[in-house]
Amino acid sequence: MPHRAFFAFIFPSLLAMVLFITLPIFSVLVQSFYVEHDAILTTVESCGPFGCDSETKVDTEAMAKLRADAPLGKFAGFSNYLNRNHLAVAEVGAIFSDNNGIGDIGARLMNLPFYRALAFTLAYCFFVTPLAMALGFAVALAVNTIPKLLRGPTIFVSLLPMIITPLVGSLILSWMFNPAGILGAGLQHLTGDPTLSLRASPALTWAVLLLYGVWTNGPFSFVVFYAGLQSVPQDTLESAKMDGATRWQSVRFVIIPHLMPLATFVALVQLMDNFRVFEPIVGFSAEANATSLSWLVYNDLVSQDSAQFGSAGATSVITIIGVLILLAPVLLRTWRDFNRKVV
Amino acid sequence: MKIRMTKALMAGAVSVAALLSGGAAWADCGITGAGSVRILSNDFEALRIVNDVAATCATATVTVTANATAEHKNIQGPALTANPAEYTVAVVANNSIVPLLNDGLIRPLDDLVAKYGASLQPNQLIKIDGKVMAIAFMGNGQHLFYRKDILEKAGVAVPTSYEDMLAAAQVIKDKGLMEYPLAAADKPGWDLAAEFVNMYLGTGTNLFADGSAELAIDNDSGRKVLETMRAMTTFMNPDYLTYDATELNKVWDAGKVAMMNQWGSLAAAAIDPATASAEVAAGTAFAAAPTINGGTIPAAALWWDGFTIASHISDEDAAASFQAMVKGISPETVAANPGVATWLVAGYEPGPTAVGVIGNAKGGAKPYPMQPYMGLLHTALQTELADFIAGKEDADQALADVKSAYDTAAKEGGFLK
C-alpha cells in the first residue's frame, strides 16, 4: 500500500486517538504539576440561624484575578508526586533510615495512603489475572466437551459474571457475605464463630475481593479461549490420541501451545484492567481495609467539597506509568516475536 | 428525579399545590415577567417537597425544573461555573456552600430579600460579611435515637453524655437484652469524619489555630474523642466499619440497636408507621446529642439547609428563582408538612421528630465550621481515621496521620505555605 493511501486510511482513527486519548492524558500530565494558588483569606462576620461568628473566608475577588492570570494554578514542579499522599519520598526515606526491622518497615509503609493502595492494587493484579485465566481456560475446556445442545445455555450462564455490572455484582456478593446473608451466616456456622465477619477482618476482606475478581474476570478469558479452542487443528489432536496421549497430555502439549498467543493477549488486557480495580472496593465498602490507585483518584476528585485536580492528576500519571511497567515484559515479548517473524 | 412543569401539566400542578400547601392556588407565586427556574438539590424528602411546591410556580412564561440528587455536591461547582449557569438555584448546607462562596458562584440576595422576602424570618438569612448569601429553611444535625423500652428494661436513664451512653450499653449487654447495643456511622468516608468532628466540637476546643489554616487537633481533646469512638466500637456489631447513616436506619429498624446518634432528617423515617417496624417504632425516642468529656454542649454539629442563587444568570431568572424558592419554603408548605424536617420557617410547631435537633440548638451545639479549608480536614479525617477505627493503630499515630495528610492537602490547596 502506498504511504499516502495508508495514511488516508488510518487518519480518522489516528485523529480520534489524539483527540480522545493523547490530549486528555497530556492535560492530566500538565495539571499534575500545578497546585492551587495561595489562598487570600479574610475574616468576616457571618450570621446564621444559630447566631453570629467571625469566619475565615476566601477573598473571592482577589482570587478571581489570580485565577484569570494563571488558570492552571501555581506551578509546583514534582511536589504533587513527591508529597506524603503520593510517593512520600521524605517519609519513605525516614522509614528506611530509622526502623526496627522488616516488619516495622512494612507496617509504616502501609500507613502511607499511596503504598497501601499500591499494595492492594498489585496483589489484585497478580492474584486475579492468572487465576481468572486458569478458571476461564478450565470452563472453556469443559464447555467444549459438552453436547452441542447444552452449549448455548451453558455459555450464557458462564458469561453472567461479565454481563452483570461490576458495581452491582460486588454489591450482590457483599450482601451475601453480610453476617445476615447466606454466605456470611454459612461461614459463621461452619467455623462456629458467631463474631466472624468477612467485612470486619482485613485479611478476609482482601480474600473476598480477590475471589470476586476471579469470578468477574473469568468469563473474559473463557470467551477468548473458547473461541481459540475452535481453531485447534483436529489432525494434531487425533494424531496425539493415536500416539497414546492422555487427555491431559493433549491439553498440555497441543492445546496450550496453540493458545499461547491468545493467552498473551488475555494477560495483557487483564493486567491492564485489574490494575485499575475500583468498583469492588466501593461495592464491598472495603475502604477501611483495601484501597486502590483508582480509588485514590476518585477520593481526590469526588469525596470532598473542592476537588484536588493536581493530586488526582499525579495519581493518574503514576497509574499510567504503573500500567506501562506491568505490560513491559509482555510488550517486549510481542515485539521480539514480531521481529523474529519478519526475519 | 426530574420534574418539569409546563402548561400541559398544569392540571397536575394544581393538584400537587392543593395537596402540599393546603389549598393555596398555584397562581399565588405572583411571578411577573418571564424566567427560568432550575433547581439543584440534595435528595431527601423535605427537599423534594420544597422542589415540588416551587415547581407549582410554573406559568406560561416561567419554567421550573428541579434535579434532586445525592450527587449535588459534585455537580454544583462545575454547573454554576458555566456562564450562564446550568442551575439557577443551588440548595446547600453549611459545608456545601463553602466551595460556592470560595469561587464566587452565588450572588448576594439583599435586593431580592427586600423585594420578595416578606415571609422570611431574620434568623433564616445567612449573612456573610454583612451580605445575605443564602436563605436557610431547615435545621439538621445528628442526635440521640434511643429505644425507651430497652432502656426501661435495663433500668438506666436516657444518657446525656457519651460516658453515660457507654455505661448504659454495658448494662444492656450484661443483662442480655442486646448483644450490640450501640451503633454509629463509622464507615470510613464522609460519615466517619463527621463522627469525629461532632465529638470534637462537643469538647469546645478549636479545630484550627486561631485565624489560620494550621490544624490543632493533636491535643488531649483529640485523644479523648478517639478514645471514646474506640470504646463505643466494643459495643457494636463487628461490621460497624461498613455502616453509614443510611445503613444505620436499617439496622435500627431491624431492632438490633438501643442507642445511636443519627441525622434528624432521618428521624421521621424511623417512626413512620408505613415503613418502620411497628415494635421498634413504638419504642423509639429522640433526644439531643450526648455531651463528651464533661463538656456542657451536645457533641454534634448543627447544620442548616438553605437555598442560594447562582451568580452567572440573568437578573430576571434570579428574581423568578428567588420567588419560586420563597414559595417552596413558605409557611404554607411547612404547615402542610410539619413532620418531615426541623423547619426554621415562621409558624413551625416542632413535632416529636424535631426534639433532637432543637435540643442540640438549645444546648448550644456549634455549627459545622465554614472555614474554606474545613473540607480538606474532613477528607483527611475520612481516610486517615480508617486504620484507627478498625483497631489497627493508636490514637497518637492516627492524629499524626491526619495532620500530615491535611498539611499535604492544604499546601496543594494553597492554604498552607
Image: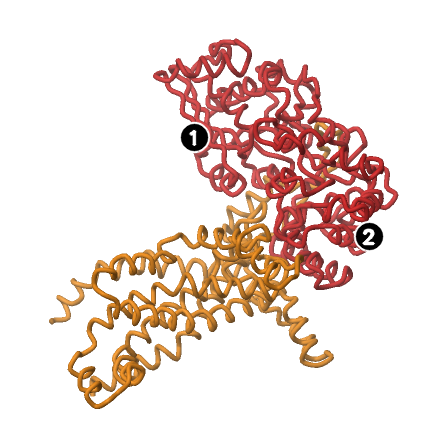
Q: Is residue A17 above or below residue B5?
A: below
To which quarter of the image does residue A117 belong?
Answer: bottom right
Give how far apart the Cα atoms at labels 1 and 2 are. Answer: 45 Å
Q: How many marks?
A: 2
To which quarter of the image does residue B265 belong?
Answer: top right
Give me the chain letter of mark 1.
B
Pinpoint residue B244: horizontal percent, then vertical percent: 62, 46
* Residue B304 seen from this side: no
Pinpoint residue B323: horizontal percent, then vertical percent: 53, 18
State the quadrant of the N terminus of chain A: bottom left
Q: Which mark is residue B2?
A: 1
Query: Which one is in front, A268 or A88?
Result: A268
To which quarter of the image does residue A35 belong?
Answer: bottom right
Q: Residue at x 69, y 75 (%)?
A: A95
Q: Are marks 1 and 2 in one subunit?
A: yes
Pointer 1: residues within 10 angstroms few (<14), some, or many (20+)? few
Q: Which mark is residue B224?
A: 2
State the quadrant of the C terminus of chain A: bottom left
Are dots 1 and 2 in contact, CB under 8 Å? no
Q: Residue at x 69, y 32 (%)?
A: B129
> In the rendered structure, which amino acid carries the disc numbered 2?
Lys
